[in-house]
């Protein structure tokens, strides 16, 4: 039996927290006199009321949270936050239909950053701030999940690579989790503030700086400008964005080790090394053709390349150049980056380097196993041996990810869009990136999709953000039959 | 140390066999007075001479063939056959440059069926027959490999599913292999003759009937007509083609059981059931949109759909309708079929149903394993338990297949072709299918590619035909370091 009462209590607390995070938007609405303060207040009030009723109805319940409640809590949390999170859009009249509002909200909470807004700069400032805030909430949520919930659920096979988290065998929350969560929360908040200050120094207004700081650290990619980061021609601002996108895509535990001076622990992370190396190598190599095809100066060519590579691989999705304008080979390479994902234990979405690394290393060893069928050939990541079970988990994740990408593309193509657009929209939704190729290139938005496709793509965003299995398992009989 | 002398002896025998199979083309050249008999005779003579020298130089060698010689023999066989197999094209002046000749020959021997010939019907009849013969030789070769070599090498994880072949643990050729090989050879030859007779009954000329019979049973897809099977408007001929493509894509051991009346053994094959079911379901479902978008009669719509579905899934590549002309959703679905492959132990290329089946079944069970982490949840195929090692092998194969597809597409896109053409050309080469999407749609040919791309695509055909690992392992240090 599922302990629904324990779930209800947590959902209540979550909605009350959500309502509090709607309030800063009210301040901006009043300051800019943008007229959306009542919509935000009303949204906050609704969330608080429903949340309060839920919380206090079940406050005396003391049911245990087990694995199965864990799955429900994760999926329901994102769903409830999506439903109440879209109230500011609807009540302010910024977005008037359900599919657009749910798309924009889920795109925010999953830190995807795809948008249906055709003129971002005319959106009321309070609601626009809430839009950035949804991404920051989503980034925060994913840290909590990574540290506290996924290890418990044993999902996707990466739990062992997120430093200091307990293994999947434990069925209860590990006491050290509270400590780890606190550290990562400090890293997240601290870096957000630092990014904001540096954006301010670079010349952004206070409002723009705080908005972009929130969406950078969440690897979200929502901007307050129609042209995204291309609006800011200042190289300083763009390099700040590159740095903080890079940090937001780094395992936060690794950052914590870096801050506290434990550099040996930083270098012990194979994922961090692979992530950093791939970013640099790709940026340097691709700069040459970008320089050749764009006809820009060397520094600008390099900066554009580095920005787009970091933005796509960290799944942030800020844009300063149209990477589909150079050459079909480059377009395909940038499209491939939608399947990278940055690090486990960061706010980035997608597949993530540790999974790619496990697959590549293991495939290479597979050849050794073919030549020496009787030899025991272990795989090591971060100096530790990876079990066959984890390897199977990860290969399964990769294949199911690609399968969902394929079937998702078929659905969008059947809805009447060309194949490149289908590939692009599905890859960028599933990977929580934002921009893509085809009609959803870096200069486009998602407004033209029909309501069904918008809701379908929103579902893919949730699926990707919650590491596929969290949601998929709810569709199997095993979950409901279990006791 | 690699036993090169044993390899030399086998290569010699192979080349002598190849030269004999060039001779029927001489007969057709003389009969049609097409002027290419000297080119074919000279090619046969060269192959025979080189083969004879190799064979008799090493005939007294009695070195053992072990796993490592096995890999070399497989790769070298296809390479040597490709080099001597292109002589008829070059000596007859049909194809005058190296990259075109190697492409056409490898496309034949790998049973891919992609062509650089712009006017097939003007090709001299002797050489054209040789072209069909290369596919039949390739089909024969793959049966030998499947039965005798791949199980020894333990490649791709499907050795256990090819009925009656010994497991990968054995390091020597199993005595029962000769018996199994003989049966499958009877099936191959018998069905080729039957197909030829039925094509003749349907109204094809003797020459066309024998050519199409050879390329149908090889799941090759080379035709003697520019319009491929669309030239034959007779429904009878098209249904005969459908039936024999289906049989060519069935595990030959299953066919043998069927012929000898052991139907319980036929129904025990999960792969056969899945293969048949998917073909029928896809053909029926897709008939409706094809009927809607093509505006043709019901029977013609169904026949077109069934033909194209069977042709793509069995990796034959005959064409009777342009499947890219209906709707982008249908185009994408037909493109996906390039990744299916038919059955292990047939002449079809690609991934093959048994691998898909293992992945799907295992993924489903993975959810059960997530919910019940301590339970032992075994996977069964054909009623037998599949070991974790085989499952890992197969998932690895799938991922490496998709990785080669991705990187291959990048190479072709970098060479200056659009992304859809790159996806299409690479998918159809790797899967040994023939037609694809983009500029290599069902009505196009491969003549426009530059020489580098042609050779690269030929390499992908070989890679796909030899189950990836046979060739890839030669590029690892493990292979050369082993003793
Ligand atoms: K994003
Ligand atoms: K073929």
Image: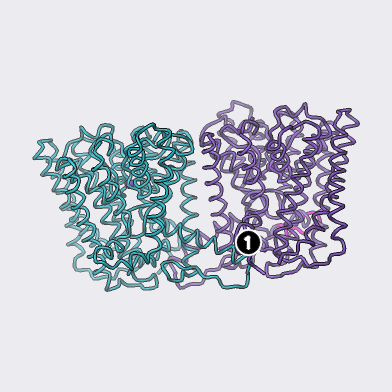
Chain colours: A cyan, B purple
Residue B262 shown in magenta:
yes
**Protein chain holding label 1:** B
Q: Is B33 displayed left or right of B169 in the figure?
A: right
Numbered disc total: 1
Q: Is B288 or B99 nearer to us in this picture?
A: B99
Say whether residue B184 is magenta.
no
Looking at the picture, does residue B127 appear above or below residue B173? above
**What x and y, as percent, mark residue B256?**
78, 56
In front here: A325 or A132?
Answer: A325
Name which residue lies at 20% across and 56% down: A189
Residue A4 x %, y %? 29, 63
Q: Nearer the viewer, residue B390 or B86?
A: B86
Is residue B431 shown left or right of residue A303? Answer: right
Q: Which residue is mark 1?
A: B157
Disc 1 residue lies near ligand 2 with CB under 8 A:
no
Which quarter of the image is occupied by the C terminus of chain A? Answer: bottom left
The image quarter containing residue A252 is bottom left
On-image quarter of the N terminus of chain A: bottom left
User: Whereabouts is ligand 2, in terms of quadrant?
Assistant: top right
State the residue at coordinates (43%, 33%).
A293
Q: Main secondary structure of the magenta part?
A: helix
Residue A253 x %, y %: 30, 64
Q: Is residue B232 visible?
A: no
Q: Is residue A90 visible?
A: yes
Which quadrant holds residue A233? top left
A116 to the left or right of B95:
left
Helix, strand or loop under label 1: loop
Q: Is residue A483 above or below residue B312?
A: below
Range shown magenta: B258-266
């Amino acid at each position: 039996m599922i302990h629904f009462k324990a779930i209800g209590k947590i959902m209540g607390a979550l909605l009350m927290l959500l309502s509090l995070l709607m309030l800063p938007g009210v301040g901006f609405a009043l300051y800019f006199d943008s007229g959306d303060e009542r919509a935000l207040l009303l949204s906050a009030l609704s969330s608080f009321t429903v949340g309060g009723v839920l919380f206090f109805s079940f406050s005396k319940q003391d049911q245990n949270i087990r694995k199965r409640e864990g799955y429900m809590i994760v999926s329901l949390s994102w769903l409830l936050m999506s439903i109440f999170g879209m109230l500011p859009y609807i009540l302010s009249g910024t977005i008037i239909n359900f599919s657009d509002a749910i798309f924009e909200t889920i795109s925010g909470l999953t830190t995807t950053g795809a948008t249906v807004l055709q003129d971002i700069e005319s959106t009321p400032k309070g609601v626009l701030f809430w839009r950035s805030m949804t991404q920051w909430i989503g980034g925060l949520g994913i840290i909590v999940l990574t540290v506290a919930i996924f290890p418990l659920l044993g999902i996707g096979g990466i739990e062992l690579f997120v430093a200091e988290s307990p293994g999947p065998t434990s069925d209860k929350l590990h006491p050290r989790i509270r400590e780890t969560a606190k550290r990562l929360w400090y890293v997240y908040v601290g870096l957000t503030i630092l990014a904001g200050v540096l954006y301010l120094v670079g010349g952004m207004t206070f409002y723009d700086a705080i908005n972009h700081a929130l969406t950078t650290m969440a690897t979200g990619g929502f901007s307050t400008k129609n042209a995204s980061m291309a609006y800011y021609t200042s190289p300083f601002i763009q390099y700040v964005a590159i740095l903080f996108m890079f940090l937001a895509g780094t395992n936060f535990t690794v950052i914590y080790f870096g801050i506290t001076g434990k550099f040996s622990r930083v270098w012990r992370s194979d994922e961090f090394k692979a992530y950093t190396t791939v970013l640099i190598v790709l940026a340097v190599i691709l700069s040459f053709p970008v320089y050749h095809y764009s006809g820009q100066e060397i520094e600008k060519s390099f900066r554009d390349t580095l920005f787009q590579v970091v933005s796509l691989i960290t799944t942030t999705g800020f844009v300063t150049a149209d990477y589909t304008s150079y050459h079909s080979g480059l377009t395909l390479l940038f499209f491939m980056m939608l399947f990278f994902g940055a690090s486990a234990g960061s706010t980035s979405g997608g597949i993530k380097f540790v999974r790619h690394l496990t697959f590549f290393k293991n495939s290479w060893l597979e050849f050794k196993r073919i030549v020496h069928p009787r030899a025991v050939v272990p795989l090591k990541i971060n100096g530790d041996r990876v079990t066959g079970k984890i390897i199977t988990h990860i290969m399964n994740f990769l294949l199911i990810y690609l399968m969902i990408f394929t079937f998702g593309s078929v659905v969008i193509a059947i809805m009447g869009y060309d194949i490149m657009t289908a590939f692009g929209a599905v890859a960028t939704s599933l990977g929580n990136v934002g921009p893509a190729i085809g009609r959803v290139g870096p200069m486009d938005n998602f407004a033209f999709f029909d309501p069904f496709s918008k809701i379908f793509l929103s579902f893919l965003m949730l699926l990707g953000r919650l590491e596929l299995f969290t949601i998929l398992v709810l569709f199997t009989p095993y979950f409901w039959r279990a006791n």
